Image (cartoon, rainbow, N blue to C red):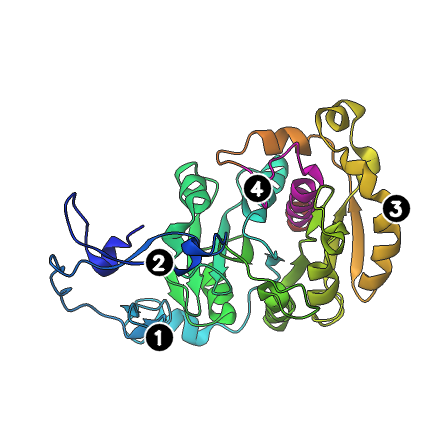
Amino acid sequence: MAYTGLVGTPEPGDTVILNVSALARGLGTGGFALVVALPEALPADPPPAPGHLVKDRYSPTQTMVLGVDDQESEHHATLARATGIDGMPVLVADLHSALPAILAGIRAEDPELRVAYAMTDGAALPLPFSQAVAGLQEAGWLADTLSVGQAWGGDHEAVTVHSALLAARHVAGADITIVSQGPGNLGTGTPFGFSGMVVGDHLDAAALLGGLPVAVARMSNADARGRHFGISHHTLTAVGRGARPGCTVPLPGLATLPDSVAAACDPDPRIVAEALASQRAELTAHTLVDVELDGLFEALEGSPVRLSTMGRGLTADAASFLSAAAAGRWAARALAG
């Protein structure tokens, strides 16, 4: 894989320097042969351009971009004055794979809503790595993208989640913004050693700016790891312990799932009901709302991009996608009053 804006465009027969460290270990995160350089076909130096934000800083592939609130940006004055996001719902998810499912839930209520996506730097740094984002924008499901922190490559570049949310509202004109890390989250199996721990910080940022912080519950009815069955420990920790009280946590009302849908899934997503009953107690600092699922499975089937989480599709881990879609549905309804 080559990021042509950084290293140039490889042609057949070119010599390439590759980074295969994660690929050689067989890892899902970072598991590609990444082109570091074309030593015999170096690209021309880029022409002078405005912008002085350096991202992926002090690595050999650091890149300079024009920030949306950069002094040289046409939006600088707007963002210098902006102090809040006017109650905009901000859906914060642990996994990148939740993005199309959240959008399906939003669009099931109101396909005219303008939705932005802020990709944080907890996983993949280049936003163009995400085929899902490309497909969602092509289909008109996503109006704008913002790359946050060390991440780069969005329609707008932001230094922090705070400036990304302000730009989503006041520059992109978003009705709703979704925040998550890019593809390839990192976890160690320890209580706090996972990249999604920043979900709590991002919910706090939404609240600080006068938004409506909505936590997207990471769920699974198929993950063999007990810590992720039902509501994942990532959500129970990052939201239950890491976010300030007062967020909204929509949960899929699995009891409302039609029998015909449950029969099409393997395993039946309703098997998590017993686990959910006890896990809810770990989120009582927030407002838990049950969202009925009528029509959401069909909305998910209509996604313009492939639904996949940890290698599992819609019917293999329906609870995961229904949870994200339920959050999207609730946020859209919150806007409608």
Residue labelled with disc 4: 311
Q: Tell me the residue at 85%/49% (across/down).
A: 275
> Over which residues does the magenta segment extend?
307-331
Residue labelled with disc 2: 153
What mark, if any, has residue 274 been given in the picture? Answer: 3
Q: Amino acid at mark 3?
A: Glu
Q: Amino acid at mark 1?
A: Arg
Q: Are marks 4 and 2 in contact (CB under 8 Å)?
A: no
Q: Are marks 1 and 3 in contact (CB under 8 Å)?
A: no
Q: CA distance from mark 3 to mark 4?
A: 25 Å
Q: CA distance from mark 4 to mark 1?
A: 31 Å
What mark, if any, has residue 111 been given in the picture? Answer: none
Q: Residues within 10 Å of mark 4 (few under 14, many from 20)?
A: few
Q: Position of residue 1 (x, y in %)?
A: 32, 50
What mark, if any, has residue 57 been given in the picture? Answer: 1
Q: Amino acid at mark 2?
A: Gly
Q: Are marks 1 and 2 in contact (CB under 8 Å)?
A: no
Residue nearest the observer in this picture, 293 or 54:
54
Q: Amino acid at mark 4?
A: Gly
222 in relation to 72, above or below:
above
Residue nearest the observer in this picture, 195 or 52:
195
Q: Tell me the residue at 84%/36% (across/down).
A: 255
79 in relation to 10, above or below:
below
Question: Within the magenta stretch, is there residue 180?
Answer: no
Q: Secondary structure at mark 1?
A: loop
